[in-house]
Image (cartoon, coloured by chain):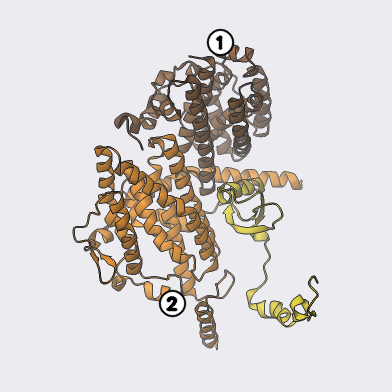
């Protein structure tokens, strides 16, 4: 009897999804849907937060006051975006601090791109242009995701992120038209961030275990390869425009399809970085863990004070 | 180590004078003052608001979605509550 | 060098260096919401530094703009107080440093709003709005930490003990101030100090903190004599401009 009810609920649930009716926190949803969302949204939130570090690294060294303010505002936005996303994870019954502890214990993943180091100012340009550019490709379709709180958070994120890619491209364009040493700095950053940016879309469709179900549930609206292609098609002409070279000797434009064809991605590197063997995995997670541990006394103090004050009020 | 976290608050923002406060999301804060300040820092970085309400999430009592049919559908058939239900002869412009 | 230039540099450098310190927190805050709040303060301070140093450049009239002044002076030419260059320490130390500073800056900007110098008064008016919020934020935190747990009370009392010796320099005056006072550009710093003392006393009382009895003072920043911290701050702040001179970014 119970089984019949569940399959009926599941049928109605899928019907809503097919009709593009949003699912809201208190609505019935299959457990797998809930778990998939918790995993995906918290991973996304972790990526925003860990993503603060490679750029945060350059705030005190920004070359002028305008760039400093822009970079601060951008990294701050990432904290905000992490927060919007944790806020939507909590609507699914997950607890924010527990999901953060999963990040710190290595149980939860985040975008591997942030395990690469930022070694020059040009990396601030490359990250804004390429990493945020790739992120936007991923995120724009998520504004129509079937889960209401996630979709609404993404609308806000996408609106705010529109300046992120522009400021990165502006940095790169400025360097590319600068002195030879600046142009070289820009090209070097592009060389290092190009391939990891392509990897941000995840494994090829054939290898991706979550895609089919997620597409059916409208948690995901395009496959990894589709999004990657959109990114390459959008980005290659931008590089040409500012006179930088995409570090892919096999890259060519296919007149018939109207798309660029990329060379082979080094998936071994991708999986190694995912497993924890990237240049900065340990640093990034250690840094975040330390921030939380160092802040525990502050959290406790604020709680203690709030309790004291409530007691005094009611006394 | 996560047992001591701050309570969750729902944040509502009035975007400009004359409009309602609208739910924008949640955040964590130890007390009401902090909830409003965090709401300011988190949700109005781009001049999105001129007023903030913070309500502790546990104090929000929500309708049950499984009762949505009986709560909300009965009003669907009461079309006479809408002005478009009525015929107004041609020549009458403001009514 | 005019007194007005020197005075604006002092104000601007306080914002610049404290903004630098505050920005070091970005990504490392005790909790996400507070990380965002501290970055907002850093952004306000960087914004103030930009307006003030640009204006200092205009007053000087030698073609230096805010960036040239922020990134290309020698350490002795920075005139910020020693307080703002002190290391972040734990969150409580950062909050205490900010509170001591905000409690001074708020009455200062209030008075400067009425400055005979129109540009300075305009900058003060805008900065005052920001500073009022900073003070509310830092004062509330001093109270929470002071009257929070035993650990937090001890920690923030310790921060106060360490930072107290740098607070008197906020009210440092010399011939620069005397000249501007006579021109109606600034008011007597004693008025600012009186307000500061009231704010500090009230907040510490509520926070159950004790003002240190050790009144030995550390000064020097206003004259360009800094602590060991300053060289490291400038090494980061100036890194790009020094390593890659004469380039546009």
Residue in the foreground of this view, choosing between A47 and C160: A47
Residue in the foreground of this view, choosing between C103 and B43: B43
User: Cβ–Cβ below 8 Å for labels 1 and 2?
Assistant: no
**Which is more foreground, mark 1 or mark 2?**
1
| Image quarter of residue C75 | top left
Compared to residue C242, the image places residue C184 above or below, namely: above
Chain letter of the yellow region? B
x and y, in percent, of residue C159 in the image: 53, 30
- Residue A61 visible within the image: yes
The residue at 47%/20% (across/down) is: C61
Specify the subunit that label 2 lies on.
Answer: A
Residue behind mark 2:
A216
| Image quarter of residue A231 | bottom left
Chain C appears what colour?
A: brown
| Image quarter of residue A138 | bottom left
Chain letter of the orange region? A
- Residue C24 visible within the image: no
Compared to residue B64, the image places residue C213 above or below, namely: above
Specify the subunit that label 1 lies on.
Answer: C
Compared to residue A253, the image places residue B29 above or below, namely: above
- Answer with left or right where residue A312 lies relative to residue C20: right
Which type of secondary structure does the marked residue at label 2 adopt?
helix
Q: Local crowd at mark 2 within 10 Å, few (<14), some, or many (≥20)?
A: few
The residue at 35%/64% (across/down) is: A230
x and y, in percent, of residue B84 in the image: 74, 78
Residue behind mark 1:
C175
């Amino acid at each position: 009897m119970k089984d019949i009810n569940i399959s009926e609920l599941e049928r109605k649930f899928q019907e809503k999804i097919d009709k593009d009716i949003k699912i809201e926190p208190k609505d019935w949803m299959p457990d797998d849907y809930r778990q998939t969302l918790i995993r995906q949204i918290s991973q996304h939130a972790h990526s925003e937060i860990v993503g603060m570090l490679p750029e945060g690294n350059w705030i005190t060294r920004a070359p002028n006051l305008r760039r400093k303010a822009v970079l601060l505002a951008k990294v701050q936005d990432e904290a905000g975006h992490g927060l919007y996303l944790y806020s939507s994870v909590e609507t699914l019954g997950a607890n924010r601090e527990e999901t953060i502890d999963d990040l710190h214990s290595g149980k939860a993943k985040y975008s591997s791109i942030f395990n690469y180091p930022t070694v020059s100012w040009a990396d601030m340009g490359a990250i804004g242009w390429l990493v945020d550019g790739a992120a936007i490709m991923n995120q724009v379709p998520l504004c129509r995701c079937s889960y209401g709180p996630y979709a609404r958070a993404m609308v806000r994120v996408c609106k705010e992120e529109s300046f992120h890619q522009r400021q990165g491209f502006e940095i790169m364009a400025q360097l590319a038209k600068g002195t030879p040493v600046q142009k070289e700095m820009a090209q070097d950053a592009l060389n290092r961030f190009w391939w990891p940016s392509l990897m941000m879309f995840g494994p090829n469709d054939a290898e991706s275990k979550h895609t089919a179900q997620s597409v059916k549930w409208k948690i995901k609206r395009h496959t990894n390869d589709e999004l990657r292609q959109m990114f390459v098609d959008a980005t290659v002409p931008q590089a040409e425009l500012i006179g930088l070279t995409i570090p892919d000797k096999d890259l060519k434009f296919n007149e018939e399809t109207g798309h660029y064809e990329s060379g082979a991605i080094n998936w071994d590197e991708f999986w190694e970085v995912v497993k924890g063997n990237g240049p900065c995995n340990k640093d990034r997670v250690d840094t975040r863990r330390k921030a939380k541990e160092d802040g525990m006394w502050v959290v406790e103090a604020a709680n203690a004070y709030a309790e004291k004050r409530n007691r005094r009020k009611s006394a | 180590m996560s047992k001591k976290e701050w309570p969750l608050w729902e944040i509502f923002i009035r975007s400009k004078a004359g409009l309602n406060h609208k739910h924008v999301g949640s955040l964590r804060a130890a007390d009401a003052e902090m909830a409003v300040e965090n709401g300011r820092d988190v949700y109005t970085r781009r001049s999105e608001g001129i007023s903030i309400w913070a309500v502790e999430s546990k104090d929000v009592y929500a309708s049950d979605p499984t009762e949505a049919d009986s709560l909300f559908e009965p009003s669907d058939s009461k079309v006479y509550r809408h002005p478009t239900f009525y015929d107004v002869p041609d020549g009458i412009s403001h009514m | 060098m005019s007194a007005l230039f020197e005075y604006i540099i002092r104000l601007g450098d306080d914002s610049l260096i404290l903004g630098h310190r505050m920005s070091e927190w970005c990504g490392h805050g005790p909790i996400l919401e507070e990380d965002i709040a501290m970055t907002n303060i850093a952004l306000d301070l960087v914004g103030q530094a930009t307006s003030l140093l640009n204006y200092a450049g205009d007053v000087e009239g030698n073609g230096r703009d805010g960036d040239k002044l922020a990134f290309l002076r020698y350490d002795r030419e920075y005139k910020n107080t020693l307080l703002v260059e002190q290391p972040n320490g734990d969150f409580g130390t950062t909050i205490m440093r900010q509170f001591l500073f905000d409690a001074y800056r708020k009455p200062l900007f209030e008075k400067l709003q009425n400055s005979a110098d129109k540009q300075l008064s305009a900058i003060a008016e805008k900065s005052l709005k920001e500073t009022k919020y900073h003070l509310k934020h830092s004062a509330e935190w001093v109270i929470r930490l002071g009257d929070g747990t035993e650990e937090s009370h001890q920690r923030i009392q310790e921060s106060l003990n360490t930072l107290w010796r740098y607070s008197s320099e906020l009210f440092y005056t010399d011939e620069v101030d005397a000249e501007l006072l006579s021109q109606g550009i600034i008011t007597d710093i004693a008025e600012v100090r009186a307000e500061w003392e009231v704010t500090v006393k009230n907040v510490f009382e509520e926070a159950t903190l004790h003002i240190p009895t050790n009144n030995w003072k550390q000064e020097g920043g206003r004259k360009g004599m800094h602590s060991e911290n300053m060289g490291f701050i400038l090494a980061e702040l100036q890194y790009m401009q020094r390593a890659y001179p004469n380039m546009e970014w």
